[in-house]
Every structure is written in C-alpha cells, then in structure tokens.
Image (tube, rainbow, N blue to C red):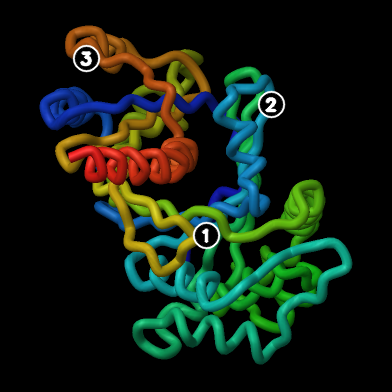
C-alpha cells in the first residue's frame, strides 16, 4: 500500500446537491482535475462516543471547538470486517478497565470477516477530527483491525502494533515512528477524556474523489494562488447503523438521488469552481454525516410514538 497522509489542516465545506448540480460540477472539474486512482470506493466509518453520545450532542450545538473519534476502512470487505469486529459483543473503554484479551480480539475479528483472513491484515485508520474556528485538523494512524480493537479497548499502542503488525513493511515501520507515536498519544488522551467510550454509529458511503491532474502542477508552478491540495469528493448511497442496536438495519441518511459534495481546500477556490457554484446556485450546507445520523436516531422514538397515536386514534 502507498504511503498515507497522517496530518491534515484545511477548510472543508459540504454541499448537499442533486444529480444535475453534481453533473455540472463534474463537467467543470473535468478539465483541470480527474477522478483519483481509487475510483469509486466504499468507505465505512465507525464513530466512538460515550454511551449518552455526549461528543456528538455537543458537536451539533456548533461550539467554537469540537472533536470526533473515528475508525475508517476502505473497500466493502474491510468495512464489513470493521463493523463486524466492533459489533461482535460489548466493548467499553473505561477507567481502570482491562483491554480485550488476544483470544477475544481474534474471535471478534474472525466473526467480522466474510472470507477468513481476507481483511484482517488490511489497514484501518484511527483518527481524531478537530474543528476550531472553521478550520479542520485531522490526525490519524494506520493499524491492523485486531490492533485497532485492542488499542481502543485499552492496550497500549506499541503493544497492539507489536502483537498485530501491518503486513506492509514500510507501513509497519512508520507505525512506530516518533510522529505516529505522538498521534497515538493524542488519541489516547482524547479517548480518556471521554470515558467511558463505546462504538456509537457506523456511517457508510460510496465516494468518488477528484484531484488535480499531474500536468497542472507543472503549469501552475510558482503560482501562489494555486491550491495544489484542493480536493472535491462526492459521497452517495450514504447510510448509518446505530451501534446501540447493532442488529438494526442500515438506514439512509439522504435521498438516493442526492450526493454530499465536500470541497477540501487550503486556499481560495479557483475561478472555474467559483463560477460553477454560482451558476448552479450551490451553497454550503450545515451537514455532518454522524451529526445527521444522530438526529435521525433521536427522532425515531418520536416517530414511533406518533405512528402509535395515529393508529390508536383511527
């Protein structure tokens, strides 16, 4: 696997758009940009939170500072394995608690695999996403699924990596670099700040990401207004799984005809992007995947009570 980015600092704006708006943006992007090498990819994220979901409850109130803890897997098999392993039984990181034993970790991982061994060695990414005054800061690290399980449950990071190392030699070495160990310390502090911590919500989507074509870097070399890190992603088939009820089905977050477009930038938007957003009247939306799923889950009891009241009054 190629090297991955572990640290991000950028502005991220989301737009909830229909098929026509998406087609217009893709047409405008088709000159300077192209779909990245990963193409259309299934992404599964698992958010950790307190049993009362205090972290996301605070986040939806739009405070000056907010943070989220999530694990992420790329591809169908890895996503199923991630959700299966963390959903195979109770897992709580709590003060004075003991981490899962080796046997418990391996049993959980085995229960989540569609094909034995198929995804156990694939990396999952564990990170913290912080937002302060509109700027997004992300810190993440890669580790195997069993190492992630053990680390979240309370096993020290270095021990988890040594017991279940990544199969890629370069990634395995990077996992124990000073920079990655510092990220692990930050994750440990964040997890311990929100104890007790449990799996809260699964979020899955199909993503297509656009980035600048290689030749653009040569054409714009030395241009201070050129944002080489600009990325545009389109997420559709967006759905959630309430981890407090793991046996419940995945449910949609948006309509099947919609996409969530996210523009990730470190500088001003290029003129062609400004023009298409203006022409199509596409405006930023206050939208977070976990936040919207949380609000949908919170609304379910009210909806059930309403349906019961309607039936009893009929």
- Side of 195 relative to 257 (left or right): right
State the residue lying farthest toward the front: 313
Foreground mark, 1 or 3?
1
Q: Which mark is residue 244?
A: 1
Element assignment for label 1? helix
Q: Of 107 and 222, which appears nearest the observer? A: 107
Image point (64%, 18%), residue name: 133
Task: Give neighbour class at mark 3: few <14, some 14-19, many 20+ (Cα, 10 Å).
Answer: some
Whole-angstrom CA distance, mark 1 to mark 3, is 41 Å
Q: Which tag, 1 or 3, sits closer to the chain's start?
A: 1
The answer to whether any part of residue 71 appears in the image is yes
Residue for badge 3: 276
- Side of 157 relative to 12 (left or right): right
Foreground mark, 3 or 2?
2
Residue for badge 2: 65
Image point (32%, 38%), residue name: 306
Q: Of 83 and 220, which appears nearest the observer? A: 83
């Amino acid at each position: 696997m190629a090297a991955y980015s572990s640290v991000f600092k950028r502005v991220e704006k989301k737009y909830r758009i229909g098929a026509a708006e998406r087609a217009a943006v893709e047409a405008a992007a088709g000159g300077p940009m192209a779909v990245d090498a990963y193409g259309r990819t299934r992404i599964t994220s698992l958010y950790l939170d307190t049993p009362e979901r205090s972290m996301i409850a605070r986040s939806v109130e739009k405070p000056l500072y907010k943070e989220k803890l999530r694990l992420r897997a790329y591809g169908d098999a890895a996503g199923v394995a991630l959700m299966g392993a963390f959903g195979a039984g109770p897992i709580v990181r709590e003060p004075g608690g003991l981490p899962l034993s080796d046997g418990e970790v391996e049993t959980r991982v085995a229960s989540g695999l569609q094909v034995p061994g198929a995804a156990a060695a694939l990396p999952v990414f564990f990170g913290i996403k912080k937002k302060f005054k509109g700027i997004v800061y992300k810190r993440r690290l890669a580790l195997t699924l069993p190492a992630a399980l053990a680390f979240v449950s309370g096993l020290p990071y270095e021990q988890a990596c040594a017991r279940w190392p990544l199969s890629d030699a370069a990634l395995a070495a990077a996992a124990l670099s000073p920079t990655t160990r510092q990220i692990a310390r930050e994750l440990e502090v964040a997890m311990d700040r929100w104890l007790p911590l449990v799996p809260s919500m699964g979020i899955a989507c199909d993503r297509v990401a656009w980035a600048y074509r290689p030749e653009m870097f040569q054409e714009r070399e030395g241009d201070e207004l050129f944002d080489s890190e600009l990325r545009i992603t389109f997420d559709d088939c967006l759905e959630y799984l309430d981890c407090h009820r793991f046996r419940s089905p995945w449910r949609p977050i948006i309509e099947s005809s919609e996409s969530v477009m996210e523009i990730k930038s470190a500088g001003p938007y290029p003129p062609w992007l400004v023009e298409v957003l203006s022409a199509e009247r596409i405006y930023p939306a206050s939208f977070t995947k976990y936040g919207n799923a949380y609000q949908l889950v919170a609304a379910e009891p009210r909806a059930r009570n309403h349906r019961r009241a309607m039936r009893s009054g009929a």
